[in-house]
Image (cartoon, grey):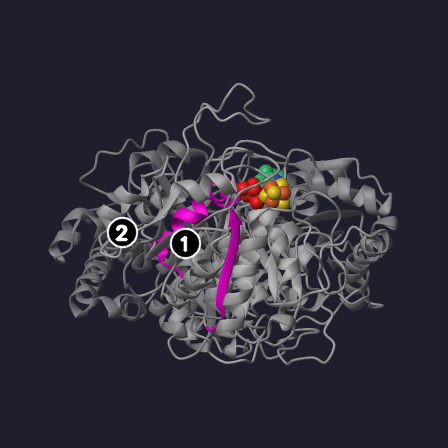
Amino acid sequence: MFYKNKMTLITDLTTSCSPTWCPGCGDFAIWAAFKNAAVAQDWNNLNTVLTAGIGCHGHLLNYVKIASVEGLHGRAIPLATGIKMANSRLNVFVFTGDGDSLAEGGNHFINACRRNHDITVILHDNAIYALTTGQTSPRSPHGFKSKSTPSGNIDEPISPVSLAIASGATFVAREYASHIPQLSELIVKANDHKGIAIIDVLQPCVSFSDLYTHDFYQQNTYYLSKDYDATNQTKAFEKSLEWGEKQIPLGIFYQVEKPSYEDQIIQIAQRPLVDKPPTKKDLSEIFKKYS
Amino acid sequence: MENQDIFRLSIGGQAGQGIKATGLLLAKIATRLGKHVYTYSEFPSLIKGGHNLIQVSISKEQVFAPSKSTDFWITLDQNTLNVHLAEFQDSCSIIFDEEKNYDFTRINKKANLFPIPLSKLSKDAGGSQIMSNTVALGVAIALLGADLQIFKDLLLDEFGSKGEETVKVNQLAAQNGYTYALEHFAEKKKNILFKEDVVEQKIVVNANDAVALGAIAAGLQFAAIYPMSPISNILHILASNQEKFGFIYKQPEDEIAAINMAIGASLAGARSMTATSGGGFGLMVEGLGLAAMTETPIVVIDGMRPGPATGLPTWSGQGDLRFVLHAHQGDFPRIVLAAGDPLEAFYLTMQAFNLADKYQTPVIVLIDKNICEHDQSMPFFDTANYAIDQGKFTTEKEAEFERYKLSADGISLRSIPGSGNFFIANSYEHATIGYDSEEIKDINSQMSKRMTKLVTCAANEDTSPKLYGPQNADVTIVSWGSNKGSILQALKDFPNVNYLHLTWMSPFPDKAVRAVLEKCKYIINLECNYSAVLAGLIKEKTGIEITDNFLKYDGRPFFPEEINEKLKSVLQK
Ligand SMILES: Cc1ncc(C[n+]2csc(CCOP(=O)(O)OP(=O)(O)O)c2C)c(N)n1
Ligand code: SF4
């Protein structure tokens, strides 16, 4: 991975809180991967902001010493897009869950993808509602038994990768949480990408899911081949539907260059909105239209 | 009608016939002649078809409210005669298209009928049917003694940007009507629209205009607003002015996104707002608490309309007061203001941005459809005394930054991501830096810190209501919001009645309200809702129970005539 400089040290990112995740939780790995990327890229309190929804994933904000916003369940994406529009210079990260972004915040997920806001969304995909102690999620497979589906889930799951591609996201990838170096690299690429980047991170929940375990992902994932064409949206969508034994692709499914939402706002072409404090405006010209 | 000095002209027709636009043209003509105007419109939630009406009240003095009856009519469909029959003055004048066979049998015989070939004159001008209203307005201003040139100048100002041809056709249509009227009805000409000796420059605005302009003037940087009646025009005005003034307007996917985007932008350091009506506010409730918990400034406009669910989209109501005062779980400080007319809407909006910044909490401004869409003439808004106040805020790196540091006034220093300062703007209860905390001392100290801000606000700001009319009166009316206009209009006929108008609902000016009401001989509480919510709030805050609640919840505003009747019946007792 490319190291920009040594300004930000891993110790600079350390907070006074210790993680409360269950031992073995995939969130530890995502945390580590993010911090490594932050050190490599010198993401710090001068250039970066983190946001999160509500879920086990959201606790991460307490463990990274970069200014952050813990929002509401499902609402981290509109919060992040508001931040990005106001200060387009910041690297804006969203840590979200599958319940957070596919159920409660599904509408925001779709619309942020189609608008191509220049943010990076790291979706902690544990196919379960973990913080609320184990109900079914939009990622849980048909037949899945959980506290809310004791006789088996009737709903069909949805893939965040398929949804993101269909919704017009311009960078869509998947990684397995414990592939820490690869995930770090992917997070860097996602942030470098102009426009929205969605990373579906397969994150085992060791407490509430014995279906999608570390073992399961270690055995059933594979990387997209070198000659895979990530610029073909139709092919990417087709690929995103793949899921099963030895059949879970990892890597960048889709990436295209398009102007980001923020690139197209004339008002911030020169400088971010918040570079200037609010100023009182003279309305005499407008008043004429009302007389 | 007691107020003989007000002249009322109404235009009725189908939706899509440009009824409201024609009324606004007349309002501007009258304003340019040095008059004051008030426009009142009624329309269903339809774009084409359906019945539309606009009433323009014109006077030498300021007009605050609509009237129940009209002196002069431009009738562009039969429905105008059917639906508004009771509003036709006995000796009113009626302009209509002579080619249409309208049924006038139910109209009083004393009425002056002006059959005009509107469609023909419109086509002669090279225009389409829709320009019949411009022809009719040409007729009206001829019969009312106005100068045609002032109309032509206005058409140039209004349509100039659409090209010379549009201006020419419109001016010709106006002229055709004007000339026809003078050729056929010269003897009926009255001298009403004459130029006043003093002509002050005025604007003709409604509260939607006022909110948008107030926000821009106050340095708005970001707005996310999902369309909804009656506030959609706020977003239209913001959208069309964003590049000129350098702020961003974003149409979000829903009201939940609207408030969360606005909170995000505010957290990043931008002056931010959103606006909606009751239904959309329902979706924003969750975000309101997020702003309060993270202590993020945000201005939320609620333009009220009647009824739960979809209710009556294009009518007016005041049923949201308790909703905005209590919306969201738990306790948190909120500032709630209510505007009674466009002027108040302008100044309260500007003030709302400073209050949000100073007290780092949501500020809600209530307006209602009755002022959102009814234009009034008034002097240019004066912003000379306004100064932006961002409160305790820094973009510089602080040596020891604690976002939620405890302080006597409850307000802590706010900063932004990217400043170098580390903090977590946390929707969970938190300790001073923002880390999650469930420690009893953090829970108690942070809650009391937040709530203290409201006490600080009440102490620092002038929240007192305004008393109109004599200090001591036989009857006192208490009310809020757009009722102000009709009450002030009605009060002109009652020197012994005064009016207590509230604009601050939270923090509530309990002492000031009690001081006035304690001394009153007889109190009438007047509101446009079923439950007399203000009376309830007054009882809760002051202990004073108002038993005479004069209420209306049919979507129509109070007319001065109704208040007049009410006052007469009370005074006769
Ligand atoms: C409006 C609202 N509804 C419900 C909840 C309760 N809740 C908290 S987290 C959560 C789901 C968590 O699932 P996910 O987003 O997948 O995150 P995870 O805990 O699995 O990381 C729910 C339902 C809430 N906090 N807010
Ligand atoms: S409940 Fe599951 S997701 Fe939450 S911390 Fe434990 S293992 Fe991780």
Callout 1 secondary element: strand
> x and y percent of residue B558 in the render?
59, 42
Q: Range of the magenta residues?
A: A89-117
Q: Is mark 2 within 8 Å of ligand 1?
A: no
Residue A91 painted magenta: yes
Q: Nearer the viewer, residue A137 or A70?
A: A137
Which residue is tagged 1?
A198
For discs 2 and 1, the disc positioned in front in the rendered view: 1
Q: Are marks 2 and 1 in contact (CB under 8 Å)?
A: no
Q: Is residue B18 left or right of residue B300?
A: left
Q: Residues within 10 Å of mark 2 (few under 14, many from 20)?
A: many
Q: CA distance from mark 2 to mark 1?
A: 55 Å
Horizontal relation, residue B47 to residue B421: left or right:
left
Where's residue B304, x and y in %?
Answer: 56, 45
| Image point (56%, 71%), residue name | B218
Q: Which mark is residue B541?
A: none
Residue at image location 71% in from the left, 68% down from the top: B403
Q: Residues within 10 Å of mark 1 (few under 14, many from 20)?
A: many
Chain of the residue where label 2 is placed in the rendered structure: B
Q: Are marks 2 and 1 on the same chain?
A: no
Q: Name above or below for residue B531 compared with residue A221.
A: above
In the image, B170 versus B111, the foreground residue is: B170
Q: Residue at label 2?
A: B133
- Image quarter of residue B134: bottom left
